[in-house]
Image: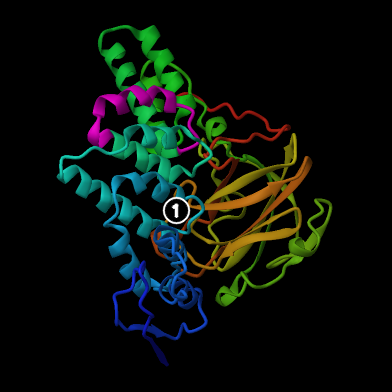
Amino acid sequence: MAYPIEPFTVSKSFCPLKSVVIFTGVKHSYFYMALVAICLVPLGQAVDEFDEAVAVLRSVGGEGQGNTVAGQVLQRLSNGGADTLPALLAAMDGANPFAANYLRGAVEVIAGNTIAKGAMLPVVDLGEFLLNKSHDSRPRALAFELIRRIDAEAAEQLVPGLLSDPSVDLRREAVDRLLGQADAKARAGNKSVSVLLYRQALNAARDLDQIQVVTAALRDLGREVNLTRHFGFLVDWQLVGPFHNKDRTGFAAVFGPEKDAALSTSYKGLNSKVTWQAYSTKDEYGMVDFNQPYGDLKEVTGYAQTDFISTSDQPAQLRLGCKNAWKIWLNGELVFGRDEYHRGMRIDQYQLPVQLRKGRNTILVKACQNEQVEDWTVQWQFQLRVCDATGTAIHSANNKELKVASK
């Protein structure tokens, strides 16, 4: 059902006089209330247009929720001056991706209009926003881009200070600069300095492509790189299986390890009794391959378990790469799962926020293999690492450093 609303005439409003706004199925939604707050205020009451508009944009949700109203408000908001840019960037803090896109759109339009008119953006205010690490990463990166658009020299001067920035996007800028310096030293024959610069770049790098570039450069110079440790992949596990996954029912089935994961326990497996067995991967990207102990089986389920010793209570992320159906438990609590098969795999494919407790934390992974027989469906494997929100590895206090030969 649609609800036509004709707003009152107010001296400050984003709603045109005598316009009709149609809400479809959202009479009691936040957007209904938000637009009423903007458009239907009592006569004589002051309305803060900017704050109300920002509130509407921050309330945009998925599946088109609030898009019509937000589009109208965005058009008005985009007519603002450059002095509103810092506030719009700040409004992106904590915003969901849909709302952040609207707010970014307003920032881009205002900045573009200002530059087209030959006017200046508030460089100092943008710089102070950038340097304030309490703001979210994406608006800070956007502030840096705005500074670079109008003053490339100033932006370049800021880059070295971004090497350990919590924003991976900003950190990338500093790593790129270091890589350029290291490459130049290597071409000039200054091997010692180039190695040190590459090491510094590797320590700071969090993006896979940069890590691979600097790793190749260091290995070409005869230096060892332990990618397993850099990423923080977990390599020492206990495996048990196989269990069935007939007709892909294994994902939902509750097998023995989900009830009792004690390493001394045995279970009824696919064809016989199964017990836990130690497994250590020597793959430098931490790949745990169930096909190694069990063979290239189909329609099966396996479990992997490891302990992670945390030095404190701390937030962390479990970052998983897997092309099979999977579930993960931390300390007996289900974290997340994905019931799909062979749709590609990459490092950090799934990023799962968790809370580690001080001391022992038990991680249990369930991986299901389906019935497909094509060459690209052979893999029954996963890789898992523990890190912070920037991708910096968090190492278990009992983690053995895996020494991988330099290639």
As drawn, is 172 to the left or to the right of 94?
left
Q: Which residue has dot 1 on it?
A: 345
Quadrant including the N terminus: bottom left
Visible in this render: residue 95? yes
State the image quarter where residue 302 is shown. bottom right
The three-letter code of the residue at mark 1 reads Met
The percent coordinates of residue 370 (x first, y second) are 52, 68
The percent coordinates of residue 318 (x first, y second) are 60, 48
Q: Which residues are magenta?
A: 148-167
Residue 162: in magenta span: yes
Residue visible at 56% across and 68% down in the picture:
299
The percent coordinates of residue 388 (x first, y second) are 58, 40
As drawn, is 238 to the left or to the right of 322?
right
State the image quarter where residue 303 is shown. bottom right
Chief SS of the magenta region: helix
Visible in this render: residue 207? no
Judging depth in this view, the residue of 78 and 36 nearest the camera is 36
